[in-house]
Image (tube, grey):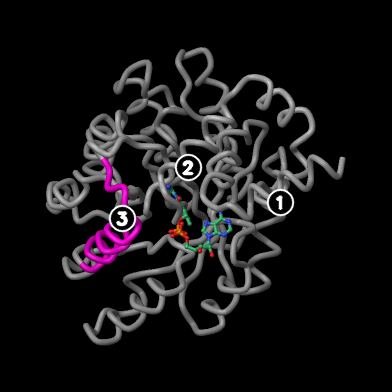
Amino acid sequence: MIDQYYRSTVLGIANAEPIKNLMQTKGYSLAKRFVAGNELEDAIKAVETLEQEGVHGILDLLGEMISTKEQSDPFVQKILEIFPAIKEKTFPKYVSIKLSQLGLDVSAELALENGRNILKAAQEVGSFVRVDMEDSPRVDATLEVFRTLRTEFDNVGLVLQAMLRRTEKDLEGLSDLKPNLRIVKGAYLENKDVAFPEKAVIDHQYRRLVYANLEKGNHTAIATHDHVIIDDMKRFAEKSNIPRSQFEFQLLYGVRRDLQKQLAAEGYTVRAYIPYGHDWYAYFSRRIAERPSNALFVLRGMIGG
Ligand SMILES: Cc1cc2nc3c(=O)[nH]c(=O)nc-3n(C[C@H](O)[C@H](O)[C@H](O)COP(=O)(O)OP(=O)(O)OC[C@H]3O[C@@H](n4cnc5c(N)ncnc54)[C@H](O)[C@@H]3O)c2cc1C
């Protein structure tokens, strides 16, 4: 976990037009470390490869922060196409979506309607759908849409971010829904009024949130590459008699593959989040902003050609 100064510097540079243009034309070969490819078939292949190592996949069509219905419709269409394409597959079916991709910034009603159609299509093929959490201005609307979806569907879960000061209350507020939650540290650049700036505090909050959701009896996806936290979670589950079926570890495609394989070999459920699609730049920038060695890897790649 990196401090906010490094994160804001990298994301600031990444959003500067000349850098964006350069990266979008020349950076794709570098982004491929974190992105399965442009097409759904590429992502399905990535799932099948990981399955051979005992790791399951989460399909994620890239694209976010869309401002019109016309922009959002093709993304919704592409997400709906996932389900017939994986219908006959024997691997566990699991998709992540972002509500801003479904038109949340146009209206919550549009995101809800699109979410319902996606969940229905997912239900028909036995797929689970996880609603990712985006930056803090979108949290209220995301919670509201999730609440409605959760009352209508069983195959839906949500993400909560440990870095946000509000999250402990949000978790409490969701209790009546018995939510399946993915807990993450949080990937967005946030102001210290709304987010904890210190790594130690975020790590502490992270543990509290996971423990709280597990103790309520809810399924919890522990989504981190932080091996110290992962080890603590294993110990906590054992000590508290939390069955392994109640939690799983989730990591990002291309990050700590060794750890993914190791956890799977130890008998834990492990899933890798597999992004695919043409809109890779925002996702890629967040991965760079997370870790200085990733920024060096990009710099070396750009200088090297
Ligand atoms: C499955 C999954 C789904 C996610 N969904 C969301 C979401 O919906 N909303 C959201 O805001 N965030 C999401 N995130 C991102 C998350 O918030 C963090 O930004 C990201 O996981 C990095 O934090 P960390 O928990 O791994 O811990 P950190 O403290 O950042 O890192 C711990 C260690 O992990 C390794 N590591 C971490 N990141 C990288 C990287 N990019 N490259 C190489 N090594 C790395 C390093 O060894 C590092 O020392 C998701 C993450 C995962 C794994």
Q: CA distance from mark 2 to mark 3?
A: 25 Å
Looking at the rendered structure, the secondary structure element under dot 2 is helix
Disc assigned to residue 181: 3
Disc assigned to residue 7: 2
Q: What type is the residue that disc 3 sits on?
A: Leu
Q: What type is the residue that disc 2 sits on?
A: Arg
Give the image quarter of residue 258: bottom right
Say above or below: 204 vs 192. below
Within the magenta stretch, is there residue 194? Answer: no
N-terminal of the two: label 2 or label 1?
2
* Residue under the point 63% across and 19% down: 17
Within the magenta stretch, is there residue 203? Answer: yes
- Find residue 217 and report its horizontal and vertical position in percent: 20, 68
N-terminal of the two: label 2 or label 3?
2
Identify which residue, 59 or 121, lies in the foreground: 59
Are dots 3 and 1 in contact, CB under 8 Å? Answer: no
Q: Under 8 Å from ligand 1: the CB of mark 1? A: no
